[in-house]
Amino acid sequence: MATTVKIDEEHKQKLERYLASRLIKRGEKIPMQKALGMMVDHALECEKFAEKLEELPPLEEDPAWKMLQKPKNWGVKDASEKIDEYVYGG
């Protein structure tokens, strides 16, 4: 079932530029209807991802974050140059 969607001129031009660039870069011609469908799918996936991020515990409760806040003292002033030696014993 096809539905007509009205879009303002500015967004229509942006969409047309996107489709033209896709044709130039990839040699792939995509009908406007398919492109809009792909964009709707992408927006919904982004929303799902954002919802999952909201479910994560606060950063302050993350064990790795806690470790970074209280690093272990290795007795070395600056370990950046000899990190492999200290981490891997080499």
Image (tube, grey):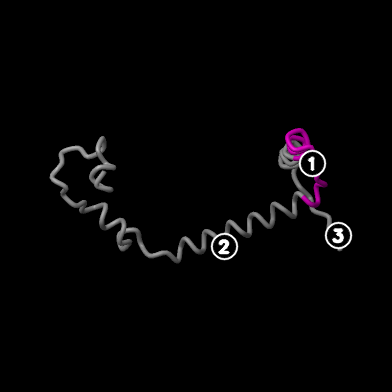
Residue 12 x %, y %: 76, 41
Crowding at dot 1, Cα within 10 Å, few <14 / some 14-19 / many 20+, comes out as few
The amino acid sitting under disc 3 is Ala
Task: Tell me the tag on residue 28.
Answer: 1
Q: Secondary structure at mark 1?
A: loop
Residue 14 image-quadrant placement: top right
Q: Nearer the viewer, residue 42 or 86?
A: 86
The amino acid sitting under disc 1 is Glu
Residue 38 x %, y %: 72, 53
- Magenta stretch, main secondary structure, is helix
Residue 7 x %, y %: 76, 47
Q: Secondary structure at mark 2?
A: helix
Q: Report the residue marked by disc 3.
A: 2
Figure check: 74 above or below 50: above
Residue 57 x %, y %: 38, 65
Camera-side mark, 3 or 2: 2
The quarter of the rendered structure image containing the N terminus is bottom right
- In magenta, the rendered stretch is 19-34
Q: CA distance from mark 3 to mark 2?
A: 26 Å
Q: CA distance from mark 3 to mark 1?
A: 23 Å
Task: Tell me the tag on residue 48.
Answer: 2
Residue 87 appears left or right of 2: left
Image mark count: 3
First in sequence, mark 2 or 1: give its number. Answer: 1
